[in-house]
Amino acid sequence: MTTIKDLARIAGVSVTTVSRALNGYDDVNEETRRKIKRVAEEMNYRPNVLARSLVTKKSRSIGVILSEINRAGAKDAMLYEILCGINDRASELDYDILLFSTNPKKQLSKSYSDLCKERNVEGAIISGLRVNDQYLQEVAVDTSFPCVLIDIPAEGNNLGHVTTDNVQGARMAVRHLVELGHRNIAMINGHNEASVSQQRLNGYRLELEKHGLPFRTELVYNGNFSEEGGGDAMHLILRNHPEVTAVFTASDLMVLGALRAVERSGGKVPETISIVGYDDIVIASYCSPRLTTVRQDKYEMGYQSAQLLIDMLEGRNIQRKIVLHNELIVRESTSPLRKSN
Amino acid sequence: MTTIKDLARIAGVSVTTVSRALNGYDDVNEETRRKIKRVAEEMNYRPNVLARSLVTKKSRSIGVILSEINRAGAKDAMLYEILCGINDRASELDYDILLFSTNPKKQLSKSYSDLCKERNVEGAIISGLRVNDQYLQEVAVDTSFPCVLIDIPAEGNNLGHVTTDNVQGARMAVRHLVELGHRNIAMINGHNEASVSQQRLNGYRLELEKHGLPFRTELVYNGNFSEEGGGDAMHLILRNHPEVTAVFTASDLMVLGALRAVERSGGKVPETISIVGYDDIVIASYCSPRLTTVRQDKYEMGYQSAQLLIDMLEGRNIQRKIVLHNELIVRESTSPLRKSN
DNA sequence: CGAAAACTCCAAAACGTTTCGGATTAAAAA
DNA sequence: TTTTTAATCCGAAACGTTTTGGAGTTTTCG
């Protein structure tokens, strides 16, 4: 590897001058600069980022912490799309991405922020934390490290936050069902430690009340955001609440499980029961029936996260909270209430 | 940030001793070591990886170059699963992952290997390159940089290579169709610049010949690995070759498009035409009909890539070529040839 | 008891950059 | 002509580690 010293020697100038020439300072003669650039080109010189970062304290890299990035995630590909967005924007702005995984072993010995500091990333984007994760406290307290959280509301000095409007999303879903004539609408939620669950539940309640329908806690089941959990929840709903003709589900993945449960019980979607999901994952438009769902733009969430974090890193003072809108996609898993129900 | 100097000062020893104590050298008194460790703990000391790497020349990080990591990839989530595998193994072995994207702009100004050298990764895993990519030459010539290629056969000093047995996979698919009674079997392939396409085509031909069936080039269409391309190819097959009763397709994604084309033409899968896909992407088991396909273990490919690269980095002399087996998954998109065809 | 060996420790150099504070020379102004 | 100013350049320090090559003690052994 050729270093800046080699360049200096060959070009017959000092190391300082090479550095300043290559970095575009204006106290170097244009002719000298040209010569240095030529030599650098010829010798295929690449500055060593480690050395540079060591002195400038800027690594131009950001950490991406995706909790539970595992094969199961392939089903909804949510993390993938978020990652794509982050990657695209970061790369446009010439930042590199360090991917941190958090396997259980590490989690015990090293906190995320230690991980980040050690690796000299300038900031981090974090997704998939539960609201009671200990790291949240850590990050909120330690204001020295810039973070952007995805789908976790948190205030703090060096904290940013991007999410979608989950209340609005849930309301759209419920309104759609109400407009189709449904009155007994259950909900399959994720789990209580997810901020999005709390918000979607809230939206569900608000929209019901707006239409003068009672909010009944016994109609809300948690499916833990998993296919299996969704199936179990649906099973309970069918068994315990035969009056229910529609259910709002907090993720498409859970709908997939619910679909099976309905089938097993001899019912049919949407004929005997309407379901609206959340996320608009890829499978949603390929499975049968195709899912009516609330689309979240995961890619955009990633893209905006990267933008926000880098804005923060570079000292631009902008809105630290970004809320994206959702969109209701009507497909085949919902239909008007039939008299026969 | 507390540095090693701070520790030395507080602990009352030299910087050297702190370094050696923390790194487990045995020329430091156990009592001294304990004290140093205690101080380090108290001051929440984290070694600066930049500084360390600068002198050791080891960054304990690997680059992952996924060409075309974009939202479209969410459909098959292949890259995601590969990435998961890489991530899991790398993290188990305590390596960090630097994610490199290759947008067209950068590609022109900087080659992958420059990118890697500049960023001081010790080696790279590369996926998604076409066999005629200029970087392949680059990488084959420049033996100084350890690389593992996924699905690209290449020999070289510092080169590793993991793939699945595409010939065998294709043969299984075709044999399955033959055993179902089909005689006129078309193929929808990817594109000619993909190594896997070449191999699958080869497997298709070999298996046909084994069963005494003619290999007819006019029955092979390229669908460019895209849903749309698969649809177009299927359209042509249906129009030009009404005798065809089964098609082997080089990716599930293309099957999805083909399914639509069949539907538009008034046919039905598998009743009027049988299709077997490749990859076993997530959608394959959710779409309708569920896809008979050749499963590749993408996660394992990633996992093995990481293992192989790190073996190479750490000087272990092992087999540089890893070929995983595929598995035929029979679902609903294939059925025995009917007399009515 | 003296020499060798073992045990602890450390100063300084090195890694490849950037940056600070001038120094030298040439051009412009007085 | 002398003084300012502008244009170029450079030496040395700094970033936070690891490593080299010893040096000073203490222990062991003949």
Image (cartoon, coloured by chain):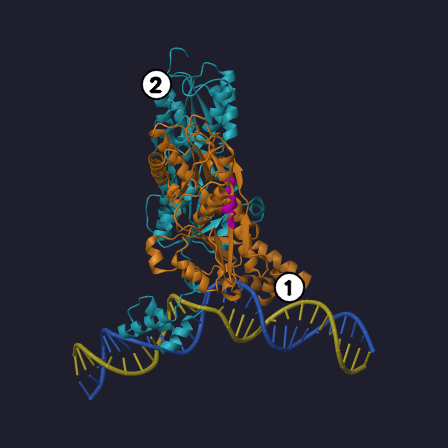
Chain colours: A cyan, B orange, C yellow, D blue
Q: Nearer the viewer, residue D7 or A274?
A: A274
Mark identifier at residue B25: 1
Q: Is residue A340 above or below residue C20?
A: above
Q: Name the spot of residue C6 as percent of width and height, x first.
A: 73, 69
What chain letter is assigned to the residue under label 1?
B
Q: Name the spot of residue A151 as percent of width and height, x first.
A: 42, 38
Q: Is residue A315 above or below residue A289?
A: below
What chain letter is assigned to the residue under label 2?
A
Q: Which of C17 and B332 is in front in this view?
A: B332
Check residue B290 for magenta coloring: no
Q: What residue type is labelled 1?
A: Tyr
Magenta: main secondary structure: helix
**Residue underneath mark 2:** A180
Q: Which residue is rendered at x = 52% and y = 57% of the image?
A: B160
Same chain for the residues under marks 2 and 1 in the image = no
Check residue B172 for magenta coloring: yes
Q: Which amino acid does label 2 sit on?
A: Leu
Q: What stretch is highlighted in magenta?
A: B163-173
Q: Name the spot of residue B307 as percent of width and height, x first.
A: 56, 53
Q: Which of marks 2 and 1 is in front?
A: 2
